[in-house]
Image: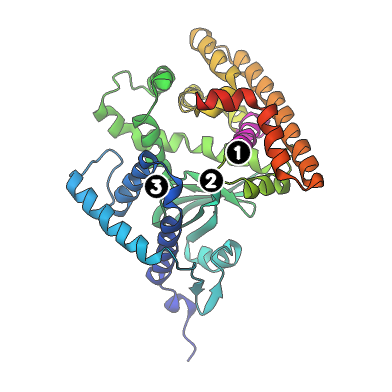
Amino acid sequence: MKQDQNDMFQIDDITDQVLENCDISDARYAGLYSICGLALRLRDLYKWEHKLDPWIENDPSEILKWIGNKEEKWEKLAEKDFSDIILLGNRFDPFDVKGINAILEPHEYIYGGGYARSLKPSFFLAAIEDKKEINGITIFVLGDELARDLLTIPAMSQDNCIYVRKDSARLYLWDQIFYIKKSGRYALSFGLEDYGLKEQTPVNLHRNLSKIAANETDTYIYHELGEMQDTVFDRKTWQEIIATFPHTPIELLTRTVKDLLADTSVHGTLAHIIEERKTSSLAFYVAFLESFTKILFPQITEAFKEFTQTRNWEVIEQAVAMGYDTAKSRAETIISVYRIGRKKNDMKWFENEIAKQFKFCFARSSS
């Protein structure tokens, strides 16, 4: 008698396969990060593995022992190739997300496999909590994560789908709050007050973190929607530049411009925030801006200062429109210079020309 596929499906077996590829990726790419950056990512991974709330800090000796064990495991895997994923007798390349999910989705699981910043391969496996559609794009809201790597990514897009990772999003939000820079504290406090946290004590943050994280989910979704529907920065050209200059200032510039197009477009993050009048999400957006983004999009910071006094959304709309026009112009410059460099078959020329054109932001970001 032929065995039923539901009987053959063993999620633990698949989880182990994905976890090994996560470890291989981490073993190969841990050197990309600064000591502090790697420590933060290891801290998140430790909390996930031990199912701890984001604010729980175990005894440092326990964490150090775990890190030691993790590094020993990485040493054994550093030279190993990624393994194929075997599902119900079928063998898949680990980056064949569509093929793998064709089998997993009916069992209410989703797999992700792609390339993150600096072209680090990143994998995850999670349970499906919800599925919906926006503008013809499928949104999966994912719950319990069974496998993940060093990267705490709240959402990602692939194959006309967006995956919102609730576990990672909650940890990601906590990290942003906990490690907030001095320049972002006012905006953060403003946003938390809008959530009703006038007394911003650790206890209040702990109690409200899940509610806040759930409410901020749309921010991640609309960023991905904005990026997927962007027609300015040709995706093929963008991918070529990223692949040619991984882990360089050019990659950072290119990713930031692409992100700003997503955030400031009519389909993106800030358009949704404005339409829904989500004051807290606007405050968080400003509070958590990365240094490079602040340099390329100073209008939003200035507009937010005025907004806190007037609550005038038109000021934000004007800043977003200016931000979009500027990001569009910069994207077109990068594309044009890249195509000339490719025609010359001289990527060094492209690199030097970009350094000249964007000297203002490279100089300020390193100061």
Looking at the picture, how far across and down is residue 269, in whole percent?
Answer: 58, 32
The stretch of residues the image draws in magenta is 250-268
- Indicate whether residue 259 is drawn in magenta: yes
Q: Which amino acid is tagged 3? A: Asp
Q: Which amino acid is tagged 1? A: Arg
In the image, is 115 to the left or to the right of 80?
right
Looking at the picture, how far across and down is residue 309, in whole percent?
Answer: 49, 7
Q: Secondary structure at mark 2?
A: helix
N-term-proximal mark, 1 vs 2: 2
Q: Is residue 301 above or below residue 154?
A: above
Q: Secondary structure at mark 1?
A: helix
- Indicate whether residue 311 is drawn in magenta: no
- Mark 2 to mark 3 CA distance (whole Å): 20 Å
Label 2: few (<14), some (14–19) or many (≥20) C-alpha neighbours in 10 Å: some
Q: Is residue 24 above or below residue 183?
A: below
Judge whether residue 230 can be spotted in this image: no
Q: Quadrant of residue 363?
A: top right
* Residue 278: numbered disc: none
Q: Which amino acid is tagged 2? A: Arg
Q: Is residue 18 above or below residue 49?
A: below
The residue that mark 2 highlights is 117
- Residue at 48 percent across and 38 percent down: it is 217
The answer to whether mark 1 and mark 2 are in CB contact below 8 A is yes
Nearest to the eye among marks 2 and 3: give it: 2
The residue that mark 1 highlights is 255
Instruction: Give whichever of 76, 259 is nearer the camera.
Output: 76
N-term-proximal mark, 2 vs 3: 2
Looking at the picture, how far across and down is residue 58, in whole percent?
Answer: 20, 44
